[in-house]
Image: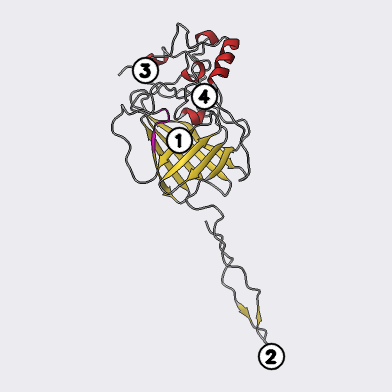
Amino acid sequence: MFRRSAGPLALVAALVVGAPLTHAQTAPAKAAPAASDIPLRSIAGTWTPARANSGNGGMGPASMPSDGKHEPPYTQLALDTMKLYHPGNGVNQVVPSKINDPAVIFCDPQGVPRMDVYEFRDLHIVQEKLKVYLLYQYEQVWRTIWTDGRKLPENPDIQRWMGYSIGKWTDDYTFVAETTNVDERTWLDKTGRPHSDQMRVVETFHRTGKDTMDLTVEIFDPRMYTAPWKPLDKFGMKLLPDDFDSNEMMCSVSEYMEYNKQMGFGQPTSTNGPPPVPPQ
């Protein structure tokens, strides 16, 4: 966006009747219109939620908490699948000893979009010629988003913890990433919302200012949800200084197991076991 000057400058001449012609008086020249200070086609840098402690908690994303009032449009398959999931938060919360959340009892990767909707802390974004990297503070994991024009995989059996992502710029301030092939062992959030091998996640990073950005996450999964839904809708982010040093937040299996033991959470040897993969 450009800031425009008030208008063309006019030369003002002072004439005095019957007197000699005087020099014309010229108004001071104004600076040329300045270009916007928002970087073009760049979301690089270290970002954090604009509002402190708003990075979404155990009850699910702020815009869609699992409270019985903000549930997404489940299919019957989703409702049946959720009966197999025993989360530690939300409307289906169970006692700690019954939890079978893989990310809680096994320290499994959270996957996409759970990385965006649970414990969303600092996010470092690196842009290269053919790809964009997303480096998350929580669990110290990273993702690759390809920007070289390739297509998403057509084989849903090729699954990855973080899925397979491609992205493109839809305008100078908006970067859109699409992700498929997310490992079905992952949950959408800590409340046990499920997904299938047909899930497609669309993340929209919209630069709104030099130091501000909005993140919208939309989920498409016709097997689990009757319509697309947004766990995050224009979630505000702010840019941190270049020299900002994020704290280490790694998932140590040994420390996790000891914590689970002390808290009475479900253990890897629990008879409950991990939840099965949703039926095909």
Instruction: Find out whether residue 88 is within the magenta segment.
Output: no
Q: Does the magenta stretch mainly form a helix, a strand or a loop?
A: loop
Q: Which residues are magenta?
A: 161-165
On screen, residue 259 versus residue 195, left or right, reads right
Label 4 and label 1: CA atoms lie apart by: 22 Å
The residue carrying mark 4 is 60
- Tell me the CA gap for discs 4 and 2: 80 Å
Circle nearer the N terminus (1, 2): 2
Q: Secondary structure at mark 2?
A: loop
Q: Please report whichever mark, 4 or 1, sits nearer to the chain's N-terminal start.
A: 4
* Residue contact between numbered discs 4 and 1, judged by CB atoms under 8 Å: no
Where is mark 1, residue-wise?
143
Q: Quadrant of the C terminus?
A: top left
Number of the label disc, if any, that sits on residue 277: 3
Residue type, numbered disc 2: Val
Out of 166 and 246, give the one closest to the viewer: 246
Q: Report which residue position mark 2 lands on.
A: 17
- Rendered view: 6 above or below 57: below
**Furthest residue toward left:** 154
